[in-house]
Image: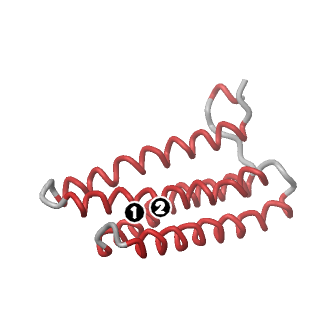
Amino acid sequence: MVSSRETVFVQFLITVAVLGAVVPLIGCGYRGPHDPAAMAAIWIGAAVSLLGSLAGAVPLRKAYGRPAPDRLPAIFVAMGVRVGTVLVMAAVVAASGRWPLRPLLVWVAIMHAVLLIPDSLLAVRSMTGRRATNENDR
């Protein structure tokens, strides 16, 4: 039987993976095949935000199941890790000059905003310690 902790994080990983694939595909469809450099920048920007989101989930996973006073600092650490990872990676990728700067930074911001939803839900679940609603977990 899978524990509630594992179920919460598997749901998070699936959600982030789906959003990380679908949202850039929409962006590539909007840009069209006329600008391959911009399409690459869209995918790189999405990957930067995706990795930031995954890095921010690590402190929450470690704090899940602890007493409530011990979980609150993990949420702040997770927010800092997420933003810090995205800022550092975006700066490095932008400074490399391999991709057009405007679509790269726009898609880092778009994906960061989109992935804020599952990140916030994960933070709330880790703070409340709420069990998953799956019937198999009861």
* Colouring rule applied to residues: secondary structure
- Spot occupied by residue 39 in the image (x, y as percentages of width and height): 26, 58
- Spot occupied by residue 98 in the image (x, y as percentages of width and height): 34, 67
Where is mark 1, residue-wise?
Answer: 45
With respect to residue 75, does 6 lie above or below? above
Quadrant (top left/top right/bottom left/bottom right) for the C terminus: top right
Q: Residue at image x 64%, y 43%? A: 9
Q: On the rendered structure, is 88 left or right of 102?
A: right
Q: Residues within 10 Å of mark 2 (few under 14, many from 20)?
A: many
Where is mark 2, residue-wise?
Answer: 48
Q: Residue at image x 41%, y 73%? A: 94
Residues 74 and 83: in front is 83
Mark 2 in CB contact with mark 1 (< 8 angstroms): yes
Alpha-carbon span between mark 2 and mark 1: 5 Å
- Spot occupied by residue 126 in the image (x, y as percentages of width and height): 71, 53
The tag on residue 7 is none
With respect to residue 114, does 20 lie above or below? above
With respect to residue 4, does 121 lie above or below? below
Q: Residues within 10 Å of mark 1 (few under 14, many from 20)?
A: many
Q: Say which element carries label 2.
A: helix
Q: Quadrant of residue 2?
A: top right
Identity, as a three-letter code, of the amino acid under mark 1: Gly
Q: On the rendered structure, is 34 left or right of 135?
A: left
Q: Quadrant of residue 119?
A: bottom right
